[in-house]
Every structure is written in structure tokens, then in C-alpha cells.
Image (tube, rainbow, N blue to C red):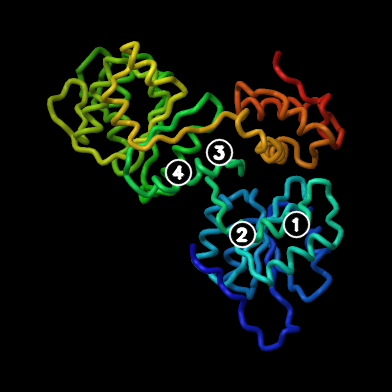
Amino acid sequence: MSAPAFPKFRANEVDPIGVLVVSPNGRLRCELREKLSQGRWSLTEAASGAEALECLREGDSEILLLDPLLLDLESIEFSAMVREQFPNVQILSVNSNTGQLILGTLSPTPLSGQLAELLYSSGNTQSNAFTPVQLHRMRTAAEGRVGIRGMIGDSEAMRRVYELTLMVARRDTTVLVTGESGTGKDLIAQAIHLISPRQKQTFIAINCAAIPEPLLEAELFGYVKGSFTGAAQSRIGRIHAAHGGTLFLDEIGDMPLSLQSKILRFLEQGEVQRIGSNDNLKVDVRVVAATNADLKGLIKDHLFREDLYYRLAIFPIKLPPLRERLEDIEELAKAFLAKLCPGVTLGTGTVEALRRHDWPGNVRELRNVLERASIVVGGEAEILPRHILLEP
């Protein structure tokens, strides 16, 4: 972990301190503008990550108040860019679901801590705001917090997923992502690609369960003209199309047994052979596979090759079901509401009601429930337990 940057030297300690607020939420920017009108803070505002980078290049900001819900950039990527290009700028995270302030320090210093205390003490009495004790704990622990693009949750189980993903992403190791349906396996696959050195190359995804068996081989490996009825012209397959980039084999457990030997050969030799051709084509592809199936059970039933399993599971990442990380439900619900129904908040007892459900459909089911609630709530300002319609 790199040491935190020191605040810029100021000849006159009464000079205003530059603060840049980055948020697409105009209501949040207005609220922060009012709070920072007191004291010696010089405020600059930006509605997007790109606009914020321009402000940092042109201005003299020392502290950045960052809304994670940027529209043009993922906050983790934007934060990394700021730390690389402007190492003296201190970053405070402002979670702004519907304009409410929830502060967590990403790069704590006495200066940023002073600002956090000011924002807390100047009228932020929202029921979900952190207490000063929680703020202090976040300041001491936040530098160790990691996150993954598109993934929400700070439970211990999810932190472990983030850590494993970040560890393996920069290598070419084959990854097997497992977990129940609706846990976000595709997001992990995309994150691995976006963090990897292959990020500027192609990301190809194919759902092995969605394509009929007779067509799946042609989709994966390609074919030459005339190799079968309907092959009017030659075509490369998805594997070849991913050359230089990442291939995501989703629902690998549903791949027909007849194709598994060919996938194994591709993984071991880095070659593909189009249908109807004797030529082997070299490809440079990083593979991420995912499944909600019990592959070891399929192996016992002779439905999945054991050698293919061990070739795929060089680095396994298992996503926890939502029922095993109930502490993440509030953060997930707020994030969904911010997109589905801006301005509507979670009312008293709603989070507790959500946590009592066992969520067989996981995060996908939670989003569906929140979307129904955003319709049922009508013009009311809060989602209450009576608005939560769970499937029987």
C-alpha cells in the first residue's frame, strides 16, 4: 500500500482550500455547496468524471468529493486515474443515493478528515448517515477497501471475491467463476477483462446453454465454405474472434460432452480448427468460464470431463449467494432505487423486511423486487414494507 500523499504546502494557512465535487446529482452538489459556504473552502463542481479531470488539470483542488454513481466512468477506475495523475489530491467518497450524504474516506489525511467532520456536523442528520465513530473507523480502514466494477457490497465474503479477482486479473490464468444464478458471475468475468492487460482488446461472451448443440461448435470454432449445408461462406468462430482478448464461456456446465474434448484441446494447445478444415490456427486467448452447476457432480455422472474441469479451475472464484451476505442488502437496494426511482428512499422497516427473505434468485431477484416496489410506491416518497411484493 502506498503512503498517503501529503497536503500541498500553502504559504498562508488562511488561504482557501480547493474542493472539487464530482457528481451527476445536482441536488447533492447544491447541498454540498451550502455546507461548504462556511469555513475556508473553495468549491468547484463537475457533473462527470471527464469534466472532473479537466477541472483538476486547470484548477488547484486539494480534496475531491466523489459520488460513486458517475455516469461516464466507474468510480474505482476514476479514483485510480486521479491517484496516478494527481497524487496530492485527497479523495473522499460521497455515497449520494437520492442526495443523502454517507461519507467514507478513501485516502485519509487530517485535512480530508477535517472536511468530513464538517460535513457531518453541519446538519447531516439523515437516519442512514454514519456517526463520528463510524467515520473514524472508515478513515483508518478505508485505504484497504477494494471494489470491482459493477459489483456492490462490502461484506467480508464480497471483499474476498474482490481480492481474488484483483489478484488474478493481471495474469493470463484461466478462471472458473461459480455461484448460484443471479449472483453476478458475468460481472466478475467482465471485471477480470477490464483490469487485465488485455482490456483494450476484444471481450467475447458466449452462453453455452443458449445455443443448440448442432450450432455451438460452429459458433465456437468457425467453419469453411461448403463444410455443411448452409455454410455459404467461411467464418471464424468466437474463439478466434477473441484473439488477443478474453473469451467468456458462460454456463460451461451445459456444454455438450461431445464438444468438451475440443475445448480442452484449445485450452492446452492454444489452437482451433474450423469445421471442414485441417488447418490449426494459433490463437492467444484468455479464458474465463462460469457456471451455476455442480461440476464435480456432473463429473460423477459422466456428463463433464474431469480433465476439462481441472484445466478450467486453475483459479476458482466462488460468488456467495445473497442470503449469505445480508449486510449488503441495504447498499444494493439503495443503488437499485437510485436508478429505478430517483428521489425515493427506503422507509422504516423496509431493509429488515428485505433481510428476512432468503433470496433464491439472489441479486437479480432483489433488483426485480425493487423495480416492482418502485412501481407500487406511486407518488410516495418512501419504499415501505407494504410495497415489497415477494414471489410466493
| 4 or 3: tag closer to the N-terminus | 3
Residue 133: which disc? 1
Of all residues, the one furthest to the bottom in this rendering is 11
Query: Label 4: how many residues lie within 10 Å, few (<14), some (14-19) or many (20+)?
Result: many
| Location of residue 139 (image quadrant) | bottom right
Q: Is residue 94 visible?
A: yes
Of callouts 2 and 3, the N-terminal one: 2
Q: Quadrant of the C terminus?
A: top right
Q: Are marks 4 and 3 in contact (CB under 8 Å)?
A: no
* Amino acid found under the numbered disc labelled 4: Thr
Q: CA distance from mark 4 to mark 3?
A: 13 Å
**293 vs 347: above or below:** above
Distance, label 2 to label 3, CA atoms, is 20 Å
| Element at label 3 | helix
Q: Is residue 90 above or below residue 279?
A: below
Q: Which residue is mark 4?
A: 165
The residue that disc 3 covers is 157
Contact? badges 2 and 3 (CB < 8 Å)? no
Tags 3 and 1 in contact by the CB under 8 Å rule?
A: no
For the point 68% across and 57% down, the residue is: 137
- The amino acid type found where label 3 is placed reads Ala
Residue 153 in percent (x, y) is at 61, 41
The three-letter code of the residue at mark 1 reads: Val
Amino acid at pointer 2: Leu
Q: CA distance from mark 1 to mark 4?
A: 31 Å
- Residue at image location 43% in from the left, 20% down from the top: 294
Q: Height in image: 349 above or below 154?
A: above
Question: On the image, numbered disc 2 is attached to which residue?
Answer: 106
Whole-angstrom CA distance, mark 2 to mark 4, is: 20 Å
